């Protein structure tokens, strides 16, 4: 209790840079601060303390009738939840006005393809006169790879610029990385061109989709689904001419390497072969012969929209995450070749078990996207997002809406499973409505459709991320799903929570995001679970984690001005979650509960107090300690409203 303080003393302490509150300011300053805080309270509807509705929901053994009566008595208050959809565009554009031409940064001066029409600078001296000052003496790209591809545009350029602004190369380090790919699953230009011109061939997907077309009159969907039902492992493969047989799992490279004679069709254009003939070229894989997803008992980092980027996954991997998954990618955007969407599929070489998550509403786009990824990127599994609760996805028939569209859901799962060579997993919620659970009815059908694993989030769509996850229901569904593995998800913030979750009979636990965030509040949670202890991590250790994140971000997004500001953006998004962590040494009772919002408190040092602030300006201050001062007129508003309470 000695760490508790008031809102005024908390902010006064931070403004004073760690000085005692009694030594801060005079009466006029206090009046100004009070007026400023009142304005902030008017702008942000949710106060720092836990909202009354959430406080009542968090209590165990609450009486529903009493809760209903209390809700009627409460004054109306608009709760901060969902996304800040009207937030201003925060992409900095100051560096667009004085960018150096890429032909110079890539070492091809005088070969600009746009000639006099190029809108970028071609004079290095002029560019350096306008360039913001460097941020440090060491460049993470140069120290890691022996070469910084950003040259003079790097914000740490003094570490690798020689005479005449020439880019210095560490030959020893560069040779070690020669031929290696630290990041895989990039989008090649020729593939992007094929997708944009719609010249990519979806042979397997189109074959499956042709079987879904009604064969005369209505009611063709049910009959086609019966025809496309995949036989079990004991079934004997026919000669390939049966309309009810689904081709399973030819490898992405095997299809291009096979000759028509090896496939046994005897027709079609000749396809050149390369390399030795393998059994997979002749014999098609059945479902039971596909690669197994052996992750039972492992710690699974959930796909985290916005915050689950590659640098953050590297942080979690370092702390003990066993399985990682990319951010949710929209299948239609992938099929159009959008670079921003393909960036969500990138995989770092340290991610040994890695999957991607797809979102879509229709079997044609989802099946084609699955075949596209099967042939072009390296993943260990593909996950279907049937748990996304946001309106933008739900109203289009994707996410949670698929739980109410069983025909489309079945077609999507069967279609994707028929074109993939890797296991297919599905992530669902308990249902759409708050008190109507349907997952136990859907899970056995998902198993029949061919999915290898199901992840169940113990909340409905209406609950979104409020109230506690229903682990009793997850346990019931785990028994129904057997022998198919089922991972549980929700409210894991300590090793004790993880132990209780594993006692329910699930195959493993997924540590996820949002208001019940586990990994985003404390990424060292994976270490706590594996070592079975509460880690009283110091503010300096937490700051070093942020420093590693910025280094990973500069390595991933670039060390030029654009890369620095992109790293800052994702750092601030993460800090909007990270500020909810309460140090173990300050807690009266262990462990911290995931839905509890702390009162104002002063940490054991200034940095610990600064990290506990929910004020955006304090997050920006932390980013400036790592990435230098923000640009002029810089603004930041968190993506999620629940993260911007003060």
Image: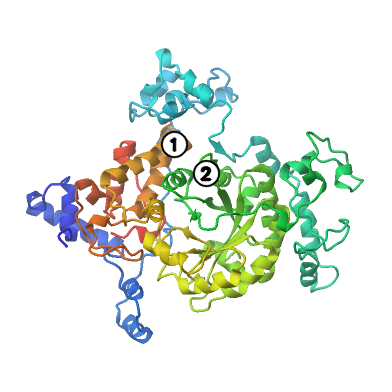
Q: Is residue 208 left or right of residue 322?
A: right
Q: Position of residue 639 (x, y in %)?
A: 41, 55
Q: Name the foreground residue: 229 vs 320.
A: 320
135 is higher (above) or lower (below) than 513:
above
Q: Name the foreground residue: 546 vs 321.
A: 321
Q: Of callouts 2 and 1, which one flags the residue occurring earlier in the amino acid sequence?
A: 2
Q: Position of residue 414 (x, y in %)?
A: 71, 62
Q: Position of residue 134 (x, y in %)?
A: 34, 28
45 is higher (above) or lower (below) than 299:
below
Tell me if residue 241 can be seen.
Answer: yes
In the rendered view of the protein, which quadrant contains the N terminus? bottom left
- Give the total of numbered labels: 2
565 is higher (above) or lower (below) than 336:
above
Q: Position of residue 75 (x, y in %)?
A: 29, 77
Q: Name the foreground residue: 97 vs 419.
A: 419
* Secondary structure state at the residue bearing disc 1: helix
Residue at 65 percent across and 66 percent down: it is 447
Residue 448: quadrant of the picture: bottom right
Q: Residues within 10 Å of mark 2 (few under 14, many from 20)?
A: some
Q: Residue furthest top?
A: 163
Residue at mark 2 to residue at mark 1: CA–CA distance = 23 Å
Q: Residues within 10 Å of mark 1 (few under 14, many from 20)?
A: some
Q: Is residue 24 left or right of residue 339?
A: left
Which numbered disc, 2 or 1, marks the residue closer to the eye? 2
Q: Is residue 477 left or right of residue 553?
A: right
Q: Which residue is mark 2?
A: 351
Tell me if residue 92 can be seen.
Answer: no
* Secondary structure state at the residue bearing disc 2: loop
Residue at 36 percent across and 87 percent down: it is 65
In the rendered view of the protein, which quadrant contains the C terminus? bottom left
Tell me the number on the disc at residue 563. Answer: 1
């Amino acid at each position: 209790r000695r760490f508790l303080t008031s809102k005024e003393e908390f902010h006064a302490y931070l403004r004073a840079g760690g000085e005692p509150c009694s030594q801060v300011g005079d009466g006029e300053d206090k009046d100004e601060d009070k007026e400023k805080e009142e304005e902030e309270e008017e702008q942000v509807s949710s106060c720092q303390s836990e909202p009354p509705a959430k406080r009542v929901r968090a209590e165990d053994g609450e009486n529903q009738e009493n809760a209903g009566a209390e809700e009627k008595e409460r004054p109306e208050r608009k709760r901060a939840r969902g996304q800040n959809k009207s937030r201003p565009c925060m992409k900095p554009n100051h560096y667009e006005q004085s960018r150096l031409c890429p032909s110079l940064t890539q070492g091809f001066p005088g070969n600009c393809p746009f000639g006099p029409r190029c809108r970028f600078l071609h004079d290095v001296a002029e560019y350096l006169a306008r360039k913001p000052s460097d941020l440090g003496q060491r460049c993470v790209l140069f120290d890691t790879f022996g070469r910084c591809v950003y040259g003079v545009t790097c914000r740490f350029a003094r570490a690798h610029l020689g005479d005449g602004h020439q880019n210095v190369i560490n030959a020893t380090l560069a040779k070690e990385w020669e031929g290696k790919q630290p990041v895989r699953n990039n989008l090649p230009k020729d593939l992007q061109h094929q997708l944009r011109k719609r010249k990519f061939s979806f042979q397997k997907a189109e074959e499956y989709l042709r079987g879904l077309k009604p064969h005369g009159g209505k009611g063709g969907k049910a009959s086609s689904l019966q025809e496309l039902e995949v036989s079990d492992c004991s079934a004997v493969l026919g000669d390939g001419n049966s309309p009810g047989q689904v081709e399973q799992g030819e490898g992405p490279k095997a299809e291009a390497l096979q000759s028509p004679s090896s496939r046994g069709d005897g027709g079609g254009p000749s396809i050149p072969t390369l390399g030795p003939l393998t059994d997979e070229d002749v014999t098609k894989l059945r479902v039971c012969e596909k690669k197994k997803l052996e992750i039972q008992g492992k710690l699974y980092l959930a796909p985290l929209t916005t915050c689950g980027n590659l640098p953050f996954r590297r942080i979690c991997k370092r702390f003990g995450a066993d399985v990682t998954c990319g951010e949710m990618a929209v299948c239609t955007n992938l099929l159009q070749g959008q670079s921003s969407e393909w960036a969500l599929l990138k995989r770092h070489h340290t991610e040994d078990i890695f999957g991607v998550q797809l979102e879509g509403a229709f079997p044609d786009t989802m099946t084609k996207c699955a075949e596209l990824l099967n042939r072009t990127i390296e993943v260990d599994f593909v996950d279907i997002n049937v748990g996304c609760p946001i309106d933008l996805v739900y109203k289009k028939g994707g996410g949670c809406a698929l739980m109410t569209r069983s025909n489309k859901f079945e077609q999507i799962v069967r279609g994707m499973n028929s074109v993939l060579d890797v296991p297919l997993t599905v992530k669902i919620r308990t249902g759409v409505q708050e008190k109507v659970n349907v997952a136990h009815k859907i899970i056995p059908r998902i198993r029949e459709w061919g999915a290898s694993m199901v992840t169940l989030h113990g909340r409905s769509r209406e609950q979104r991320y409020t109230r506690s996850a229903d682990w009793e229901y997850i346990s019931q569904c785990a028994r129904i799903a057997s022998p198919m593995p089922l991972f549980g998800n929700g409210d894991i913030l300590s090793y004790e929570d993880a132990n209780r979750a594993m006692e329910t009979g699930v195959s493993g636990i997924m540590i996820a995001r949002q208001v019940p965030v586990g990994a985003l509040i404390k990424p060292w949670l994976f270490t706590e679970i594996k070592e079975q202890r509460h880690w009283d991590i110091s503010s300096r250790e937490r700051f070093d984690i942020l420093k590693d994140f910025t280094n990973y971000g500069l390595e991933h997004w670039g060390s030029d001005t654009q890369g620095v500001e992109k790293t800052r953006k994702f750092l601030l998004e993460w800090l909007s979650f990270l500020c909810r962590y309460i140090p173990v040494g300050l807690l009266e009772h262990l462990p911290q509960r995931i839905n509890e919002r702390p009162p104002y408190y002063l940490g054991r040092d200034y940095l610990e107090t600064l990290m506990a602030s929910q004020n955006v300006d304090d997050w920006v201050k932390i980013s400036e300690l790592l990435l230098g001062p923000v640009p002029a007129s810089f603004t930041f508003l968190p993506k999620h409203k629940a993260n911007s309470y003060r």
